Amino acid sequence: MENTNNPRAVYNTKRRTPSARGKSWAGTLLVVFTLPALIVMVYVVSASRGSAVIAFLIPAVMLGLGIFFWVRSGIEQNGTISFYDNKIVHRCRNEVFELMPGQISSVSQSGNVVKIVFSGKTLTFVSAQASLITQNINSFIAAYAPGNAGYVAQAAPVAAPVAAPMAPVAPVAPAPAAPVIDKAEEIRKYKQLVDDGVISQEQFDEILKKMM
C-alpha cells in the first residue's frame, strides 16, 4: 500500500530562494556603502562641529543592517526534500515544489549540488546528503518508468469511428401490374371452341372449374 501521507525519507537542503537573494543583495549594498557613509558623516560633523557620535551612528546602523540581512539570507535558504511513495516534495520557506510521477526529466549531481529538471523547470539545491537524494530520485523515476507496476500509461484518445460511405441504392422499378382478366370473355372464348368442335364439352367443363 502506498504511503501518501507520511514521508519515508527527509533530507535537509539549502537553496537560494528569491527572498534570500534579495536580502543578500540588500546586505551587500549596505556594507559596501558603510565606508562612504562614514566618510560623509565625519566631514559633515567636522564642518558643523557637531558630536562625533553622530558621525559613527548612521554608518554603524547601515553595517548592522547589512550583517542582519546577510544572516537572514542564509537562514531562509534552509529547506527539506521529502520522499513519499507517489511524489517528491521540496520545501524552502514559502517555496514548495511537488514532483509527481512522469514530471522529472533528469537528475544530476556535482559534489553537494543536486539539479532536478522537471516540467520545463530546474530545481537546484545543496545538501550534505546529495548522493542519497540523487539515488532516491533515480529510484523514484525508475519506479514509474514504462513497464513497471507503478507506471500509468496515458491512454491515447480514441478516435470516433468513421462511418463508411453507403453505396447509392439503385431505385427498384415497380413490378408491372398483372393484367386484369375478364373471366366472362374467357368463358365465351372457350365456349366458342366447344361450339366449333375444337375442344370437347368435358374439356370445357374442366377449364371452367379451374377458372372458378
Image (cartoon, rainbow, N blue to C red):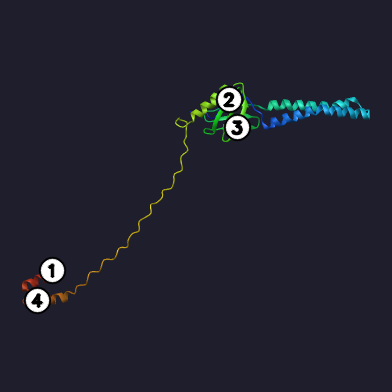
Relative to 185, residue 146 above or below: above
Query: Is residue 17 toward the left or the right of residue 180 in the image?
Result: right
Q: Which residue is mark 4?
A: 193
| Mark earlier in primary sequence (2, 4) | 2
Q: Is residue 101 depicted above or below 179 in this figure?
A: above
Instruction: Give the CA distance from mark 1 to mark 4.
Output: 17 Å
* Percent x, y of residue 73: 70, 27
User: Helix, strand or loop at disc 3?
Assistant: strand
Q: Say which amino acid is labelled 4.
A: Leu
Numbered mark located on residue 122 in the image: 3
Which amino acid lies under the numbered mark 2 shown in the image of this protein? Gln
Taking the image as shown, residue 47 lies to the left or right of residue 195, namely right
For marks 2 and 1, the one nearer the N-term is 2
Q: Residue at x 10, y 78 (%)?
A: 192
Q: Residues within 10 Å of mark 4 (few under 14, many from 20)?
A: some
Label 3 amino acid? Thr
- Would you name the residue on which mark 1 appears? 210
Label annotation for residue 180? none
How crowded is the residue under tag 3: few (<14 C-alpha within 10 Å), some, or many (20+)? few
Badge nearest the viewer, 2 or 4: 2
Extreme-top residue of the structure: 128
Q: Secondary structure at mark 1?
A: helix
Q: Residue at x 55, y 30 (%)?
A: 106
To which residue does mark 2 refer? Answer: 109
